[in-house]
Image (cartoon, grey):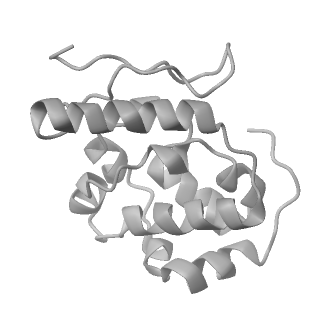
Amino acid sequence: MMASKTDPEFCLQVVQRCGGDFQRCLQCLSCASGCPFVDTMRYRPNGIIRMVQYGFSQEVLESPDIWLCVGCHACSIACPMAIDMPGLMDGLREMAIETGAKINETAILAFHREVLGSIQRYGRTRPWRAPACPTPWPTGSSRGPWTPGPNG
């Protein structure tokens, strides 16, 4: 990750918006083991938390990772500190919109349509796999594309 300048106020702004429970993160990666979409993420949930703590506001608010969270709470259930990761991701998405962060809307929309289609077809997202969908990252990125689940 090539970091731009850090914003020492960013973590405080996120705490005010989302609450401070994410600051209890142990970086144990339990959230990543619970997340059905972790293989599609560049930084994973714990990485987003760490970047917030270090003030990497631009990287966080422009990261596709904050848009990949579907609020299933699998990460929160796996977390020994019971951090409300979906709540944090919701707050970060709101901040991204408010600040005019660059967002790859086409890929995000395609991803969410596929997730909703999976829920309509199967009554849930495909278990522990991300749906097949175009990758939101440029060619040559270290993550993506999504892999199909066991049912398609």
Q: Position of residue 52 (x, y in %)?
A: 63, 64
Q: Quadrant of the C terminus?
A: top left
**Which of 23/98 is in front?**
98
Q: Residue at x 63, y 26 (%)?
A: 137
Q: Residue furthest right?
A: 5
Q: Residue at x 88, y 57 (%)?
A: 5
When asked about the image quadrant of residue 6, the answer is: bottom right
Q: Residue at x 53, y 69 (%)?
A: 91
Q: Residue at x 33, y 56 (%)?
A: 71
Q: Position of residue 83 (x, y in %)?
A: 35, 70
Residue 27, above or below 103 = below
Residue 110, above or below 63 = above
Position of 123 compared to 119: left or right? left
Residue 73 seen in render: yes
Q: Position of residue 104 (x, y in %)?
A: 66, 37
Q: Position of residue 118 (x, y in %)?
A: 23, 31
Residue 56 seen in render: no
Position of 78 compared to 60: left or right? left
Q: Quadrant of the N terminus?
A: top right
**Which of 2/146 is in front?**
146
Position of 97 compared to 102: left or right? left
